Image (cartoon, grey):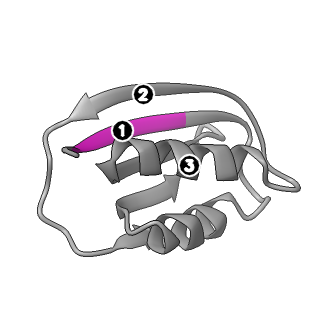
Amino acid sequence: MAEVRKHIVFYGRVQGVGFRYTAKYLARSLGLTGWVRNDTEGTVTMEVQGREALINKLLTGLNGGHFISIEWMDAKELPLEEEREFIVKM
């Protein structure tokens, strides 16, 4: 299956609830690459790359987080990038 890269902005209760570190753990366990960061507007932005089915598993796992409450997401596809891991940006 072909890989895709997605730029996703998450809205809801997504800061101060372990979102970024949950995303990092799930993404790495699924073999996905990319990054995640908090934004000043109270949102979280992520770029994630891998098979689309695995990205969907990541999103399902995030939405099932104990304290995380995703109200909605804005997503768009981007060109693939060369990278080796998933990181948390500060």
Please provide the residue range marked out in magenta. 3-9
Q: Secondary structure at mark 1?
A: strand
Mark 1 = which residue?
7
Out of 69 and 57, give the one closest to the viewer: 57
Q: Secondary structure at mark 3?
A: helix
**Numbered badge on residue 75:** 2
Task: Kindly identify the amino acid type of the residue bearing the numbered disc 2.
Answer: Ala
Q: Residue at x 41, y 71 (%)?
A: 87
Closer to the eye: label 3 or 2: 3
The answer to which quarter of the image holds residue 41 is top right
**Numbered badge on residue 57:** 3
Q: Mark 3 and 1 residues: CB-CB less than 8 Å, in contact?
A: no
Taking 6 as reference, is 4 left or right?
Answer: left
Q: Residue at x 11, y 63 (%)?
A: 82
Between discs 3 and 1, the one toward the N terminus: 1
Q: Mark 1 and 2 residues: CB-CB less than 8 Å, in contact?
A: yes
Task: Kindly identify the amino acid type of the residue bearing the numbered disc 1.
Answer: His
Say how many tags the image has: 3
Between discs 1 and 2, the one toward the N terminus: 1
